[in-house]
Image: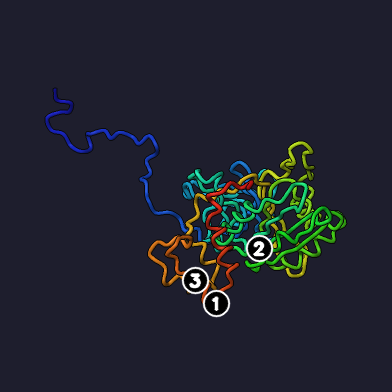
Amino acid sequence: MRRYGKHTDEDDIRSRPNRKGNRPRTHIRPKHEDAAEGLVLTVDRGRLTCLVEDRVVMAMKARELGRKAAVVGDRVALVGDLSGKKDTLARIVRIEERDSVLRRTADDDDPYERVVVANADQLAIVTALADPEPRPRLIDRCLVAAFDGGLTPLLVMTKSDLAPPDELLELYGALDIPYVVTSREELENGAAAGLVREHLDGKITAFVGHSGVGKTTLVNTLVPEDRRRVTGHVNAVTGRGRHTTTSALALPLSSEAGGWVVDTPGVRSFGLAHIDPSRVINAFPDLVPGTEGCPRACSHDEPDCALDAWVADGHADPARLYSLRRLLSTRERKEGD
C-alpha cells in the first residue's frame, strides 16, 4: 500500500519530532573556564559544603562528572550561585587532580574502595593507651593506608595517666613516626591541643581512630568554634565508644600558620583490600636498595628475599625489616589481635 502520492518530494514527508527536544546532541562539554575554585568541607547525602574564598557554599555534583565523586579535601571548580545565601545551590563541574588519597574498605574481602579524604598532608592516628585498650593491628592498617596514599603518619596516644606508652613506642620506634603522648587531664584542659598543634600548623591533617579514644574531644579542643558534635562516652560493658562523628568534616585551624583538621567517623575496622603490598616497601627508603636482588614478584617475606642478606650485612636496622614484614602481613591478621 502506497503511503504517499506518486510524485513525492522530501517536503511532503512528515518528520517525527524528537521526544527529548529538537536540539541535536553533542559530546562537546563546556570548559567552564570562569568556574570558581573551592574546597570541599563535608559531604552529606549528595550535598557538598564547599569553601569558596571566604564563603560557605552548598553545591551538588554536575551530571557531566558521571560517577566521579568529590570527597572532603577535594579542590573543585564551581559554577552557578556562589553567594552562599540560604536555599542557593551551586554545581561542581570539575574535580582537580589529587595530591594524596586516604582509602579504606569495609574489610579485606570487600572490593568496594572508599575514599575517606583527599589532599591531606598527614594522618593523625589517635589511640588510647587504656579504656579502650590499644589495637596495634588497627594502627598497622592505618599506617599501611597512609604510606600507600602518600600521607605522613602521626601517632597520638591519649589517656597516658591510665597506662604508660612504653610498649607502643617500642613497637613503632623503628618506623621513626612522630608521636604525641597526652593524658586525660591535658585533653580536658586544652594542654593536649597545644602539644598536637605543633605538628599541624600549615598542614592538612586527617584524624582517624576507633570510638572512645578521645579523637573528637581533641578535635573540638583544637577548633573550639565547632559545636556540631557532642562527645560520647565509652560503654562500660563493651569497652567501645559511641560514634559521635557521622561524616568527615574539614575544620580550619585558628593560627598564623594556618592548616586544616579533618575529623573522620570512628572506625571499627580498616580494610586494605585495595592495597597493593608491593607499594608498602616505598615507605622504607632505607630498605628499597636491598630489594634489587629479590626474585620477581617477591613478597619480601619469603626464604629467597634479598632483604635478609641486606640487613645481615649491616645496611639497615633489623627492626626496620621486622616492621615492614609486620605491616605486609597485617591483612592476614584480625584487627583485634
What label does residue 288 carry, if any?
Answer: 3
Label 2 SS: helix
Residue pointed to by mark 2: 172
- Left/right placement of residue 15 relative to residue 288 reads left
Counting other residues with Cα less than 10 Å from the Cα at mark 1, is it few (<14), some (14-19), or many (20 or more)?
few
Mark nearer the N terminus (1 vs 3): 3
Vertical side of 44 occupied by 323: above or below: below
Q: Nearer the viewer, residue 13 or 103?
A: 103
What label does residue 314 carry, if any?
Answer: 1
Q: Nearer the viewer, residue 184 or 43?
A: 184
Mark nearer the N terminus (1 vs 2): 2
Can the viewer see residue 24 in this picture? yes
Mark nearer the N terminus (3 vs 2): 2
Q: Name the residue at 48% across, 60% down.
A: 301
**Image quarter hosting the N terminus:** top left
Counting other residues with Cα less than 10 Å from the Cα at mark 3, is it few (<14), some (14-19), or many (20 or more)?
few
Label 1 SS: loop
How far is disc 1 from disc 3 in space, using C-alphas?
A: 14 Å
